[in-house]
């Protein structure tokens, strides 16, 4: 929301088994497409703002052409010139100009084709060439370059820039193939280098993952030496001191007091803000926390995903069964430690020989 308030455009997507930063089977393009579909602006925070961004570029171009009393096409060409400096930027600009032509001639098919190309939805170059006259598409190899071109588009359209947010980065950590992890790490390294060296402008990246994804020296980012040296924490930020200027920001775990406030807010949501409709009294909250503490220890507030889920389920049962007592149900609440990010993702068909770095079998002959 802060980025939107500062007139930035945001795109975001969660990594998944079928969406990765680097891949050769369409997973990287799928990540790009998902992110662009979720594009948001201050006036359209719910997503799907790509058309509005492009339309703003066209509208501003028409307005400027009228003020300068020159052809609209010349103004559009001037606005798109910076995009052409990027890798693949010429076709990117060509597609944007095709959208303008579609707007001028009321050709909705042409406008739709242009937006599909910008979202990375063309799967073949032949189809793109037939629809838009371009020879390239957004594919696995051009995702990062396309994001930089997209950032330039937001800038020339009058926005402050583009913020790219990738969540669930732990999916890279869970890749069984060491080679696949390395290729993804190399793409992340490219992004980090460009950011630290000032090689890019009008674009920022926010990648969210678990501590294991970052610090595990066998499978995490720290297993890649070049990334470890660039992402290492400030050695002086100890003893409660923090440094928020570096590339890595460690989020502090919740304290028991924080979790108590969170549970209280959840209870308030269930009651629609009416204290008289609370499903459990105040004393039920610390009792529930004590129950969780006995089950999984301090993990109940440090990684509270399962704790919150169990509390919501408890309130749901009480809401739908008015005669039930929370004291009777509390002992039945099952809470397990949140292992999110620690389990490994195994490819379909089980581990493949030579595909990973794990010992899958051992046979000793005599």
Image (cartoon, helix red, strand yellow):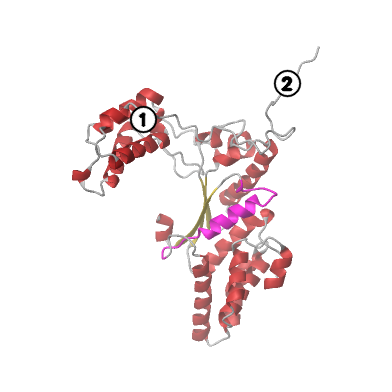
Question: Crowdedness of circle 1 by 10 Å Cα count: few (<14), some, many (20+)?
Answer: some
Q: Report x, y in % for residue 192.
A: 58, 47
Q: Position of residue 80 (x, y in %)?
A: 60, 72
Instruction: Say which residue appears at 50% left-offset and 68% top-offset.
Output: 53
Closest to the observer: 305 or 184? Answer: 305
Q: Position of residue 186 (x, y in %)?
A: 65, 44
Q: Pointer 2: residues within 10 angstroms few (<14), some, or many (20+)?
A: few
323 in relation to 158, above or below:
above
Secondary structure beneath dot 1 equals loop
Q: Nearer the viewer, residue 362 or 166?
A: 362
Q: Which quadrant of the structure image shows residue 239?
A: top left
- The residue where tag 1 is placed is 333
Q: Assign the N terminus to one quadrant of the image.
A: bottom left
Examine the rendered structure and indicate whether residue 256 appears above or below residue 155.
above
Residue span colored magenta: 18-43
Give the SS element for disc 2.
loop
Which residue matches tag 2? 362
Magenta-colored stretch includes residue 131: no
Residue 215 vs 364, above or below: the answer is: below
- Say which mark, if any, is on residue 194: none
């Amino acid at each position: 929301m802060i980025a939107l308030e500062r007139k930035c455009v945001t795109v975001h997507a969660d990594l998944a088994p079928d969406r990765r930063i680097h891949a050769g089977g369409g997973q990287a393009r799928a990540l790009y497409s998902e992110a662009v579909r979720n594009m948001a602006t201050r006036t359209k925070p719910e997503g799907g703002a790509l058309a509005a961004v492009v339309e703003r570029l066209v509208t501003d171009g028409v307005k400027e052409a009228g003020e300068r009393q020159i052809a609209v096409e010349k103004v559009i060409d001037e606005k798109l010139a910076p995009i052409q400096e990027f890798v693949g930027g010429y076709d990117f600009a060509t597609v944007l100009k095709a959208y303008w032509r579609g707007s001028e001639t009321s050709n909705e098919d042409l406008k739709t084709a242009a937006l599909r190309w910008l979202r990375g939805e063309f799967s073949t170059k032949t189809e793109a060439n037939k629809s838009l006259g371009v020879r390239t598409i957004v594919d696995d190899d051009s995702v990062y370059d396309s994001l930089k071109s997209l950032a330039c588009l937001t800038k020339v359209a009058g926005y402050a820039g583009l913020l790219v947010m990738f969540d669930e980065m732990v999916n890279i950590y869970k890749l069984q193939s060491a080679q696949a992890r390395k290729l993804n790490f190399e793409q992340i390294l490219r992004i980090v280098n460009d950011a630290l060296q000032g090689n890019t402008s009008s674009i920022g990246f926010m990648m969210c993952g678990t501590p294991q994804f970052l610090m595990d020296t066998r499978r995490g980012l720290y297993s890649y030496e070049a990334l470890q040296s660039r992402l290492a924490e400030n050695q002086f930020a100890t003893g409660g001191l923090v440094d928020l200027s570096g590339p890595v920001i460690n989020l502090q775990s919740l304290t028991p007091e924080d979790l108590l406030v969170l549970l209280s807010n959840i209870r308030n949501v269930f009651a629609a803000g009416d204290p008289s409709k609370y499903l459990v009294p105040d004393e039920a909250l610390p009792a529930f926390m004590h129950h969780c503490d006995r089950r999984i220890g301090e993990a109940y507030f440090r990684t509270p995903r399962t704790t919150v889920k169990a509390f919501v389920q408890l309130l749901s049962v009480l809401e739908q069964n008015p005669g039930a007592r929370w004291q009777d149900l509390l002992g039945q609440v099952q809470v397990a430690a949140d292992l999110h990010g620690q389990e490994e993702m195994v490819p379909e068909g089980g581990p493949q020989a030579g595909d990973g770095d794990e010992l899958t079998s051992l046979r000793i002959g005599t």
